[in-house]
Image: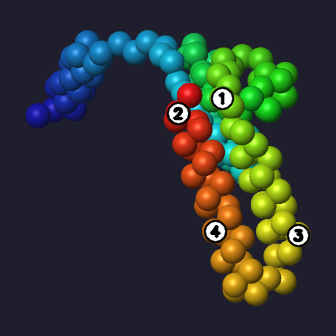
Amino acid sequence: MGSGQKLRCSAFLLVLLGLLTPTSSAEKVLLVPPPVGDSHWMAMAKIGRALVDKGHTVAVVIPQDLMVKRRAEWPDFQFEAFQDQGTYVRLKEIQEKGLSTAGKLSIFEFANLFYAMSGELMKHCSLLLGD
């Protein structure tokens, strides 16, 4: 098979695949950021911004306490709030305690902190899914 014939065959296959490939359309995307870890939210938000730029609708589910702040920072997103009953604040407090005492806690104290964080995360997720 000569190079010209290979090129025509490749071009034909490329056109055929292009015709068979379904067209894409902008859809709705849901972002559920973790309650702690602002760096994770920033990465998600940048991805969300890129999706908005491509024509997608991006909805974000967050605790009621963050609604005003996040709307001001990311006006292109649609926000849905839920009542977290203070779990977000308690999670931030536990996170700050863990960061401020890093390397100073005994294994028992660390386990208690981890247990408290796990319990609050379970409550937070339960409230998120319950609304």
Q: First in sequence: mark 3 or mark 1?
A: 1
Q: Is residue 127 above or below residue 75?
A: below
Left or right side of 83 for 25: left
Quadrant containing the N terminus in the rendered view: top left
- Position of residue 126 relative to residue 10, above or below, is below
Is label 1 in a helix, a strand or a loop?
strand
Which of the 4 image quadrants contains residue 69?
top right
Q: In this figure, which residue is indicated by the disc labeled 4? A: 115
> Which quadrant holds residue 4?
top left
> Do the numbered discs 2 and 1 sit on residues whose CB atoms are within 8 Å?
yes
Could you tell which of marks 1 and 4 lies nearer the N-terminus? 1
Counting residues from the start of the chain, the first of labels 2 and 1 encountered is 1
Answer whether labels 3 and 2 touch (C-beta < 8 Å).
no
Mark 3 or mark 1: which is in front? Answer: 1
User: Mark 3 = which residue?
Assistant: 100
Residue 87: image location, x then y, percent = 72, 46
Pointer 1 residue: 82
Q: Amino acid at mark 3?
A: Ser
Q: Earlier in the sequence, mark 4 or mark 2?
A: 4
Give the Cα separation between the discs numbered 3 and 2: 33 Å
Q: What residue type is disc 4 on?
A: Tyr
The residue shown at (69%, 74%) is 112
Would you name the residue on which mark 2 appears? 130
For label 1, the crowd category at 10 Å Cα-Cα, with few meaning under 14, some 14 to 19 and many 20 or more, is some
